[in-house]
Image (tube, rainbow, N blue to C red):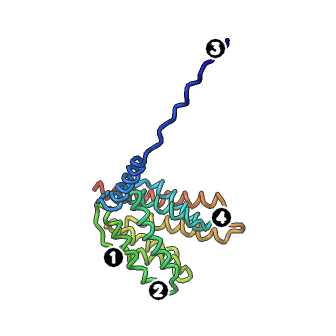
Amino acid sequence: MENLTTKPAPVRKPKPGRWFWWGILLALVVWVVVDLYIPRKNSLRQFDPKEVARLETAMWRSYYEKKPVLLFWQLATGLRQQFHAPFWRSFTLGFQASKAAFDFKEGHSRADYQRTIPDLISYYESIQALSTESFDVPKVAKLELEWWIVHRQRERYSYDDLANALVQTSAALYSQPAAPFTTYGRLRADAMRLCDDVRNHPGGATEADWQQIDAVLRRAWGELHTVVQRNTSN
């Protein structure tokens, strides 16, 4: 007579109950609320210049290649890197910046562009709320719009004008004299010129073009970081 062995019944793993999922949902809600509304401040002078440059290159490339979803994600990531925005707040900041940019894009004259000022003020008020340093929000918003106009109206302004506008904006943001930002402004304007030029290349921008733009932006953001750190140490 054969020995019959019975196989043990398979052990069923208990499925997570509804309270488990309610707990996950509650934790997510708490995270979002804390992230969006609990005050959190860091120094604007503390950032990784190489990472900020890499993300700016990536954003320009996504814009050039018409990848808006990726562009928005990179913008939010850049805001976390440069301004230490919390995760969820970086997306609200990204929305504010995008709204200002799209309103500006629809304009055709300086009077039209001026309508972007309230959006830029709201954006920089949100940046101010994250910063341990204070700056003149309306002034920075106005100067930000000015370099946008200078860059857009390239038939009227030179890249030297763009470099100067970038210098003035950075000096206002960091509440410092303009002169130390001269090299940064020139380098960042050079990077924008390179990006503008690749639009006319046969076949579009190459990988080498983007590497060159990234190299110039690394120098620009490295220079900015050096300037603001020098101010901190003094």
Q: Residues within 10 Å of mark 3 (few under 14, many from 20)?
A: few
Quote the CA–CA distance across marks 1 and 4.
36 Å
Closer to the camera: disc 2 or disc 3? Answer: 3
Q: Residue visible at 61% across and 68% down?
A: 66
Secondary element type, mark 3: loop
Of the residues under marks 2 and 3, which one precedes in the sequence? 3
Q: Residue at x 45, y 44 (%)?
A: 16
- Name the residue beneath numbered marker 2: 112
Judging depth in this view, the residue of 45 and 230 nearest the camera is 45
Q: CA distance from mark 2 to mark 1?
A: 18 Å
| 162 versus 48 height, above or below | below
Disc count in the image? Answer: 4
Q: Tell me the quarter of the picture where residue 114 sits.
A: bottom left
Q: Which mark is residue 172?
A: none
222 or 85, which is in the foreground?
Answer: 85
Could you tell me the amino acid type at mark 4?
Answer: Ala
Q: Please name the residue that numbered disc 3 is placed on.
A: 3
Describe the element under mark 1 as helix, strand or loop.
Answer: helix
Q: Is residue 229 left or right of residue 55?
A: left
**Mark 1 residue type:** Pro
Marks 1 and 4, the one that precedes in the sequence: 1
Q: Is residue 154 above or below residue 27?
A: below
x and y percentages locating residue 61 in the rendered image = 58, 63
- The image quadrant that residue 41 belongs to is bottom left
- Disc marking residue 138: 1
For the residues marked 4 and 3, what is the alpha-carbon distance in whole angstroms?
A: 76 Å
Q: Which mark is residue 205?
A: 4
**Real-space Cα separation, disc 4 to disc 2, in angstroms:** 31 Å
